[in-house]
Image: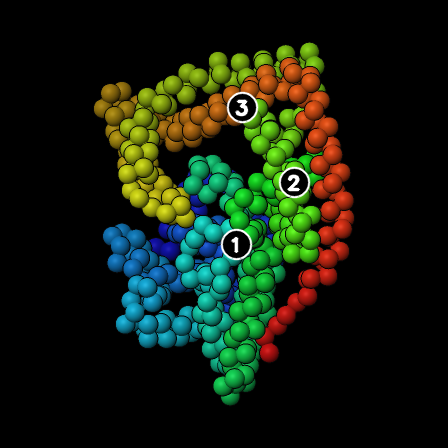
Amino acid sequence: MLYRFVRSIVAFALNLFYRVEVVRRVTDLSGPVMFVGNHPNSLIDPALVFVITDRQVTFLAREPLFRAPVLGWLLKGIEALPVYRKQDHPGLMEKNEGTLEAAASALCQSKAITIFPEGKSHSAPQLSDLKTGCARIALRVAKNGTALRIVPIGLTYAQKHRFRSRVHIEVGEPILVPAQPPDLAGEREVEWVQALTKQVGDALRDLTINLETWEDLALVETADQLFALRNGYRENDPERLRLMAKGAGLLRNLDPERFDEVKEDVLSYRARLDTVRADPKDLSVKFQGRSTTLFILRNLSALSLGFPLFALGMVLFAAPFLFLRFLSMAVPVSRDRQATLKFVSALVMVPLWWTVLTLAGWALWGTGGLVVALVGALPLAMFTRYFFERRRAAWNDLIAFLRVGNRARLRAHLIAEGERLQEQIQQLADEVRPKLEAQRTPSSPG
């Protein structure tokens, strides 16, 4: 009962905080299933498992979280299992054997568990080396005579600490782990665990964007925008971005000199676009009289019709907004935990402030005020935040129009340079694609 309640609240709140999109390569998640995922965003990552399945899932979480106020009670309530890390409890590592046994026992009973085999959340641009815990759990299950499936989950955040930013969840093809002979031991057992750990790592790399440095992100995103514009594709397609990142890494290894030349050209072009606050897609827009008029009318209409509600929302929600803003600046947390701080704070603050507004409506205007506040407070808060974000986007649109649309020489130069880069990127894509396809060779535990 508690699990279903927590899952419903958290899943609903996550869909408010983020724009969640889910791609599934598998629909049947029944039977013994181990979900494994990359770990870029602290407590948000396991919470997103609530979005992809309505099954009850047993989570493995680091032990200090079980001693945190409220959160520890919730983790115990949903029957999560503690993991003792060396950096947290050097003298308690032997307790992990009990955790692994409990996780294996749950799988043998056809339950589902979730584990993040990197062992910790981080903001590095690539997948970290995996710990062997997930493979060791799978080995216990397999030696017990139970087959299971390991389902990799790739989590890709556009801006993981920003409200209403996009998060792409990709549920990959399951790794089938058949039952193994109970006498599997010694070197064979070690090799089996290492092979399965590698297979899990390869599956997660296929579902995530892995870069050598964060500077490569601007390179990959700009190259993808130019490629998509040339071919008429949708921008920011996660699978294509992953292929772009893999292609960049492959080119860097095969021909580092050529890679450096392309990188310098693309990032130089990106810098010139940033100077005028434009994107490659802005150059493809033809600013003619009719489109210019519609552009101005659309933004003016949105401003005039939406501003009164926005102003009301700013007045009513100024206190919690400022408090959360102050909290995010005052509490020193690493980048991979910023979203968790904001999300958990909002999860606590929003119901409290909603209650305050509802009681205020009832005190001032009776039953009618109570109903209006109860029904309208949350939609107004969402609209206020959306309007605030759209105002910034509309301003950027206007800047791009003024600086690019009305300057023919600058626009012509950027278009010509963009077309040259598009041709270069298309040529590289045609060269690298067969090499990437040749690398896709599946492996399996012995």
**Label ID, residue 396:** 3
Q: Nearer the viewer, residue 259 or 141?
A: 259
Q: Nearer the viewer, residue 379 or 131?
A: 131
x then y, percent, for residue 445: 59, 75
Q: Nearer the viewer, residue 177 or 212?
A: 212
Task: Point out the residue furthest to the left here.
Answer: 363
Q: CA distance from mark 2 to mark 3?
A: 21 Å
Q: Amino acid at mark 2?
A: Ala
- Residue at the spot x=63%, y=70% of the render? 443
User: Of the residues under marks 3 and 1, which one precedes in the sequence?
Assistant: 1
Where disc 2 sits, the SS reads helix
User: Of the residues under marks 2 and 3, which one precedes in the sequence?
Assistant: 2
Q: CA distance from mark 3 to mark 1?
A: 31 Å
Q: Tally the numbered discs.
A: 3
Where disc 3 sits, the SS reads helix
Is residue 154 depicted above or below 176 in this figure? Answer: above
Q: Are marks 3 and 1 in contact (CB under 8 Å)?
A: no
What is the quadrant of the N terminus in the image?
Answer: bottom left
Q: Which residue is mark 2?
A: 223
Q: Amino acid at mark 1?
A: Gln
Where disc 1 sits, the SS reads loop
